[in-house]
Image (cartoon, grey):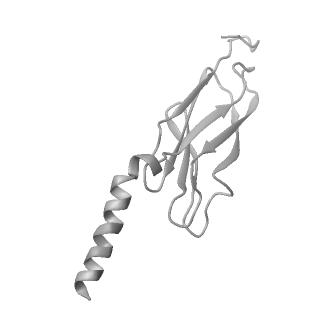
Amino acid sequence: MKRIALLIGCAFVWFFLSTGPVLANQSSVSIEGPASAEQGSEVTLRLTVTHSANSFFHYTNRLTVQVNGKPFTQWVFTSGNRPEGAVFTREVKIRIIGNTEVVAEAYCNIHGSKGPAKVTIVTSETGAPVLK
């Protein structure tokens, strides 16, 4: 009986290790928002997270946002409180004070992140929008 359990366990591990790259998917995020804004204005950014799975075992477990290098907000998910889908969105409102860099990153609970997404919202001293 122990031998059968060991064989089943080894087969299970072999299957997941041998197919890992095919099944693996890191969470990724994209940021939509204006390229420029008036000094002191508030802008809304739309974050779209993409991941191949959204199951009890495999899901996006965190989405973080930094503004000008400082933590701004984050969403933390658990197996019992997962995102609403494999692709989901969140919105953030940010007050623009000078040129503003926004960095967002999403993480898979198993495979991690594809890396951060970055946008820079540019302003001028006079408050008139400046195009990149």
Left or right: 49, with 14 as reference point: right
Left or right: 111, with 132 as reference point: left
Please tell me in which quadrant of the rendered image residue 131 appears: top right
Please tell me in which quadrant of the rendered image residue 17 appears: bottom left
What percent of the width, then of the height, locates residue 86? 63, 52
- Seen in the picture, residue 50 relative to 31 is either above or below; the reply is below
Image quarter of the C terminus: top right
Depth order, front residue of 96/51? 51
Please report the residue visible at 76 percent of the width from the left and 27 percent of the height from the top.
Answer: 41
What percent of the width, then of the height, locates residue 85? 67, 55
Please report the residue visible at 69 percent of the width from the left and 20 percent of the height from the top.
Answer: 35
Please report the residue visible at 53 percent of the width from the left and 52 percent of the height from the top.
Answer: 62
Depth order, front residue of 46/42? 46
Q: How many numbered markers are drawn?
A: 0
Left or right: 56, with 35 as reference point: left
Left or right: 10, with 70 as reference point: left
Which residue, as the protein is rendered here, is positioned at the far left? 3
What percent of the width, then of the height, locates residue 118? 55, 28
Please report the residue visible at 58 percent of the width from the left and 39 percent of the height from the top.
Answer: 29
What percent of the width, then of the height, locates residue 8? 32, 75
Image quarter of the N terminus: bottom left
